[in-house]
């Protein structure tokens, strides 16, 4: 059985502001600073997460990546900037449709790899990484990766985003499963 994980990566806000947002709305979450710029948020429960991510992005004027891993086979990344959904990316739409049976997921927004890379880099303030990210998005040979977490790591490395957040989920953190690199920095807020 593979990993099922969902978390947010907040870019362009402060840890203090993110914690304040979750305390104000009374929604349980684990938060952790990652690299001085990015903040990991693992929310619970997942219901209402998308609208909460939009609200957080709008109120804090920041970019938010919603990252979902399905059974270590499919990666979904949603990009929200200032409360507006900018992109919805699915690494393997056929596998997702096969796995989800009766659940209808949106399809990826119709961006070329270069346009998607440009958008992500612009929203995250990382224009210098556009060429490398385009390469990774243009050639997602999923046979090259045993698990989709490896593909997400390649995307994050192209953007120089912290990979410690990959596979982190509220349910795992509640059970005390804290990935290396996050020991001592993850804090629960409500």
Image: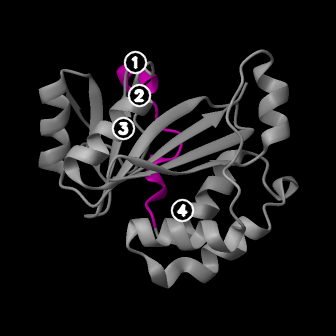
**Residue position marked by numbered label 1 in the rendering:** 45
Tell me the distance, in whole angstroms, between the alpha carbons under discs 4 and 2. 22 Å
Residue drawn 34% across and 46% down? 83
Q: Callout 2: helix, strand or loop?
A: helix
Q: Given this view, does label 2 or label 1 mark the residue nearer the observer?
A: 2
In three-dimensional space, the C-alpha distance between marks 3 and 2, rounded to whole angstroms, equals: 6 Å
Q: Position of residue 84 (x, y in %)?
A: 40, 48
Mark 4: few/some/many CA within 10 Å (<14, 14-19, 20+): some
Camera-side residue of 43 and 147? 43
Left or right: 57, with 76 as reference point: left
Pointer 1 or 3: first along the chain = 1
For mark 4, give the secondary structure.
Answer: helix
Relative to 105, is 38 above or below? Answer: below
Left/right placement of residue 153 relative to residue 128 reads right
Residue at 12% over, 38% down: 20
Rounded to the nearest whole Å, what is the CA distance between mark 2 and mark 1?
A: 8 Å
Q: Which residue is mark 2?
A: 49
Over which residues does the magenta segment extend? 161-177
Label 3 crowd bin: few (<14), some (14–19), many (20+), radius 10 Å? many
């Amino acid at each position: 059985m593979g990993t099922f994980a969902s978390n947010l990566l907040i870019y362009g806000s402060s840890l203090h502001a993110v914690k304040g947002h979750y305390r104000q709305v009374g929604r349980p979450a684990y938060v952790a600073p990652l690299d001085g710029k990015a903040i990991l948020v693992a929310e619970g429960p997942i219901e209402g997460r998308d609208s909460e991510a939009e609200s957080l992005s709008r109120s804090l004027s920041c970019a938010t990546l919603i990252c979902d891993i399905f059974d270590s086979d499919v990666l979904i990344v949603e990009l929200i900037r200032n409360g507006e959904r900018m992109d919805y990316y699915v690494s393997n739409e056929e596998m997702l449709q096969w796995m989800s049976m009766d659940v209808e997921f949106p399809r990826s927004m119709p961006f070329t790899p270069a346009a998607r890379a440009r958008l992500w880099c612009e929203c995250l303030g990382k224009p210098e990484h556009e060429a490398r990210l385009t390469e990774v998005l243009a050639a997602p040979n999923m046979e090259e990766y045993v698990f989709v977490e490896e593909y997400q790591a390649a995307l994050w490395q192209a953007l120089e985003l912290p990979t410690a957040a990959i596979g982190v989920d509220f349910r795992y953190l509640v059970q005390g499963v804290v990935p290396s690199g996050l020991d001592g920095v993850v804090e629960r807020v409500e």
